[in-house]
Amino acid sequence: MRPGTFDLLILVFIFVGLQAWWIIPIINKNIKLNKRGNDLRKEIKHLEKLYKK
């Protein structure tokens, strides 16, 4: 192995870890918001059907 390869690997892992640290919570929040939006759309459609009668 060439000198510095181990240090480079450590830096890459640190970089990927820090990126994941802030990206993963954003993705999770987006998924939750999408689920809530779908639930609200279903509720709206249900209420529209009730009041059309």
Image (cartoon, rainbow, N blue to C red):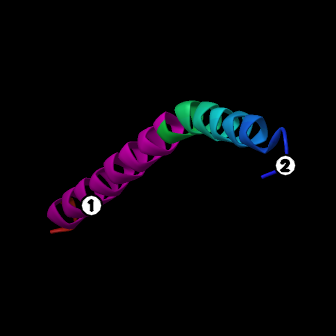
- 16 part of magenta stretch: no
Q: Is residue 28 above or below residue 1?
A: above
Q: Residue 31, image x and y in percent?
A: 41, 49
Q: Secondary structure at mark 2?
A: loop
Mark before the other along the chain sequence, 2 or 1 = 2
Type of the residue with mark 2: Arg
Q: Is residue 51 above or below residue 32?
A: below
* Residue type of the residue flagged with mark 1: Lys
Disc number placed over residue 42 in the picture, else none? 1
Q: Residues within 10 Å of mark 2 (few under 14, many from 20)?
A: few
Residue shown at the point (34%, 52%) measured from the top left: 35
Asked whether 35 falls inside the magenta stretch, the response is yes
Instruction: Name the chief secondary structure element in magenta.
Output: helix
* Viewer-side residue, 13 vs 8: 8
On screen, residue 25 versus residue 2, left or right, reads left
Asked if residue 38 is positioned above or below residue 23 in the image, the reply reads below
x%, y% of residue 11?
A: 73, 34
